Image (cartoon, helix red, strand yellow):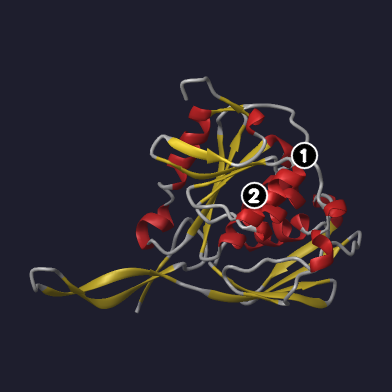
């Protein structure tokens, strides 16, 4: 078994011998690049907060983004320390906040739902319209996530990317879990002292209610995906005045809410 290192991070792919079969009956043995999964424990102030199936790398960004989306921290200064060993991320906070609890302490690769009482209208922030982004800048961001290296190498990760209102490509990350990828992206904004309200978040994953709540909790005003939104995701986006975009591909997109943040003309 051959492990491959990427970008100075921990091993994230492994080569495995597989059988590849073709329509014409050809059978070949090939070495295929496959993604490595890792079980990580998040411990906050001495208590186990969650267990997550994770793509190794950017653990600190993930922890920051996860806690920020759930209002357990308000900024990077709320963190006293973050330490990582082989299978555990340990966070100590300078300021302890209750925040939004999770429905389950175990987070599988697609999980991230909040407790039912946190879904009430009065805890969802209403996001003001402060700027616009062009149709072209959004589509450029969509094209950018398709070029993510782990996705191209293995095809088994989700991608999250941050784009500025002016169309600058800020940050791109990958993870086996779509929630993990989004947490890493938001953690990057926090660590770099950038306002979440100035960023567009583009993801490869679908946009159900819990994903929209994650973005709203972080103060992200625009979320876009190559995949679909759900009806509950759209309802949540409309309640918090988030611009929610799905099926952004091939020169078109579905805009479900707050279209005034998109600068487009009548022909588009």
Vertical comparison of 221 with 49: above or below? above
Mark whose residue sits in front, 2 or 1: 2
Residue 141, above or below 81: above
Residue at 69% x, 47% y is 237
Side (left or right) of 266 relative to 75: left
Q: What is the crowding at mark 1: few (fewer than 14 residues within 10 Å), some, or many (at least 20)?
A: some
Real-space CA distance between mark 2 and mark 1, rounded to the nearest whole angstrom = 15 Å
Task: State the mark number for residue 234.
Answer: 2
Q: Judging from the image, what secondary structure is the residue with disc 2 in?
A: helix
Q: Is residue 219 visible?
A: no
Q: Residue, x 87% and y 52% (percent of image)? A: 122
Q: Which mark is residue 127?
A: 1
Q: Nearer the viewer, residue 71 or 104?
A: 104
Q: Is residue 210 visible?
A: yes
Tell me which corner region of the image, top left, top right, bottom left or bottom right, holds residue 19: bottom left
In the image, is residue 112 above or below residue 127? Answer: below
Q: Position of residue 167 (x, y in %)?
A: 55, 30
In the picture provided, is 96 more to the left or to the right than 68? Answer: right
Which of the two labelled residues, at mark 2 and mark 1, occupies the earlier sequence position? 1
In the rendered image, residue 149, in percent from the top left (x then y), is placed at 41, 53
Going 62% across and 51% down the picture, which residue do you hit? 185
Q: Is residue 120 left or right of residue 13?
A: right
Q: Element type at marker 1?
A: loop
Q: Which mark is residue 151?
A: none
x and y, in percent, of residue 259 in the image:
63, 32
Residues tagged 2 and 1 counted as in contact (Cβ below 8 A): no
């Amino acid at each position: 078994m051959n492990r491959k290192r990427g970008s100075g991070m921990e091993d994230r792919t492994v080569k495995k011998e597989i059988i590849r079969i073709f329509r014409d009956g050809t059978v070949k043995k090939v070495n295929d690049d496959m993604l490595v999964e890792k079980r990580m424990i998040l411990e906050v102030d001495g208590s186990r907060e969650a267990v997550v199936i994770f793509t190794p790398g950017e653990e600190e960004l993930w922890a920051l983004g996860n806690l920020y989306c759930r209002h357990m921290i308000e900024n990077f200064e709320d963190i006293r320390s973050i330490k990582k060993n082989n299978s555990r991320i340990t966070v100590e906070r300078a300021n302890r906040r209750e925040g939004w609890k999770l429905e389950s302490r175990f987070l599988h690769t697609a999980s991230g739902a909040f407790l039912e009482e946190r879904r009430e209208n009065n805890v969802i922030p209403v996001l003001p319209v402060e700027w616009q982004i062009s149709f072209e800048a959004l589509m450029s961001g969509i094209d950018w996530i398709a070029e993510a290296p782990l996705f191209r190498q293995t095809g088994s990760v989700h991608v999250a990317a941050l784009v500025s209102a002016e169309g600058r490509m800020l940050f791109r990350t990958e993870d086996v879990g779509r929630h993990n990828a989004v947490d890493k992206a938001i953690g990057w904004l926090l660590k770099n002292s950038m306002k979440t309200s100035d960023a567009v978040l583009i993801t490869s994953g679908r946009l159900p209610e819990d994903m929209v709540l994650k973005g709203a909790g972080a103060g992200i005003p625009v979320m876009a995906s190559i995949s679909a939104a759900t009806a509950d995701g759209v309802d949540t986006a409309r309640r918090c005045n988030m611009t929610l975009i799905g099926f952004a591909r091939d020169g078109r997109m579905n805009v479900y809410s707050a279209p005034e943040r998109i600068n487009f003309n009548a022909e588009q």
